[in-house]
Image (tube, helix red, strand yellow):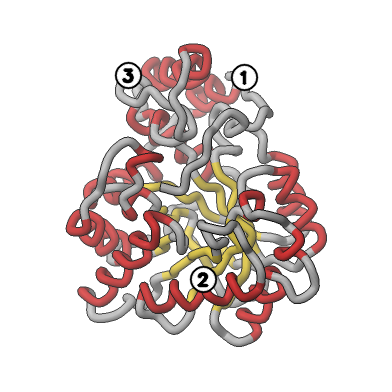
Amino acid sequence: MTANSLKPVKSTGVHVPKLCFGTTALGNMPDTYSYEVDEKRAVETIIAILTSSTPFIDSSRIYGAGRSEQRIGLAIRELGGLPDGAIISSKLDRDLDSGVFDAAQARRSLEESLEAMGVDHIDILHLHDPEHAESLEPVTRTGGAIDELSKMRDEGLCKAIGLAAGKVDVMLPLLKNHNFDCIITHNRHTLVNANGRELIDYAVENNIAVFNAAPYCGGALAKGTASVKSYVYQQASEQMLSPLQAVEAVCARHNIPLGAAALQYSMNDPGISSTICGVSKPERVAQTLEWASYPISDEAWKDLFALPRTSDDPEATREYTPG
C-alpha cells in the first residue's frame, strides 16, 4: 500500500492517506524541539504538504500558542483556498491558563481554530490531551466537552471526531465509554516502544481508525542519536538512547535510512490507518515521501523485529510544556 492509498474513517465519509504531516514544530515550539521555525519557512512547508500527493495535515489549537493553525490559514490563503482532496485534522484544547476543559471551552477552541485557518469546518476534530485538564469530570460528564464534540459533528462543523492523548490508561476508558471515530496515539508504537499496543488492538477490533503519531520518537529515529540527544522531547541518558542506537546499527548494516525504517514500521502495520510525522521545512516533505517507499529487505525487517521493545510509558519522566 502506497502513502497516498486511502482508508476510510468509519462511515464518516472521510478517507485518509497512509501518511499525514504534523505541524507541531511549524508553530514554533522551541521548548519542545530545541529549534525555532519562522513564519515564512512554516508557510512554505505547509504549502508543500497541501500540494503534495498526500495533502493530509494535523494541527491543534494550542500548538505554538495558536501559531500552527494561524500559519495553516496563511498558507491556505496564499494558495487561494484549500486544494481539492486536502484533509485537515485538528484538536479541541483546554484553557491553558485555568486547565478548564468543559463544553464552553471546547466550543471556544473550535471557533478559534476555524477563524485562524479561515475554514468553515474541520474534517477530523479530536479531543486533545484530557489528562492535562484540571479535571476529567467536565470532559466526560453529560453535556461536557465530549458531548460538545459530538454536537459539532452533528452540526457539520466536523466530519469525524477523535481522541488524541498520551496516557493509555486515560485513553482506553474514554474510548470504551464514548463514540469516537478515530484516535491519535503518539510515541507509543515505534521501533523501540509498544506501550500503545493494547489501545491500538482495542480500536481496530471496534472499527476505530488509528492515527499513529511520532514514529521518530521526537526526531532521534529520523536524524540519528549523534545529532539528537533527546528521546520523546526530553534530554536522554545513554541508557535511554541505547535502544535507538541498536536500531541505527541494524539500519547501517543493511544500508537503509533510519527514518525510512521508523516510518515504514508504522505505515506497514495493517492496524494503522495513517502515520503522522512532523516536518519543519519544505524539503522534509519530499524526503518523507521517499522514505515511505524506500525498499527495505525482508532480512532487514527480520533484524529490526528481533530487537526488544519496551511496553513502558515513554513519557513517564517527561516534564510536559505546551511550547
Q: In this picture, is 224 found above or below 47?
A: above
Query: What residue is drawn where x is 29% and y is 47%?
Result: 280
Q: CA distance from mark 1 to mark 3?
A: 21 Å
Residue type indicated by callout 2: Ser
Query: What residue is drawn where x is 49% and y is 14%?
Result: 242
Of the two numbered discs 2 and 1 in the rendering, the one whose residue sits closer to the viewer: 2
Q: Which mark is residue 109?
A: 2
* Residue 210 visible somewhere in the drawing: no
Residue 278 x/y as whole percent: 39, 47
Return the disc, 3 or 2, that comes first in the chain's sequence: 2
Q: In this picture, is 243 found above or below 80?
A: above
Write down the residue under mark 1.
308
Q: CA distance from mark 2 to mark 1?
A: 41 Å
Residue type indicated by callout 1: Pro
Locate residue 250: give its quadrant.
top left
Query: As rendered, which of 4 and 321 lies closer to the eye?
Result: 321
Q: Which mark is residue 186?
A: none
Q: Which mark is residue 226?
A: 3
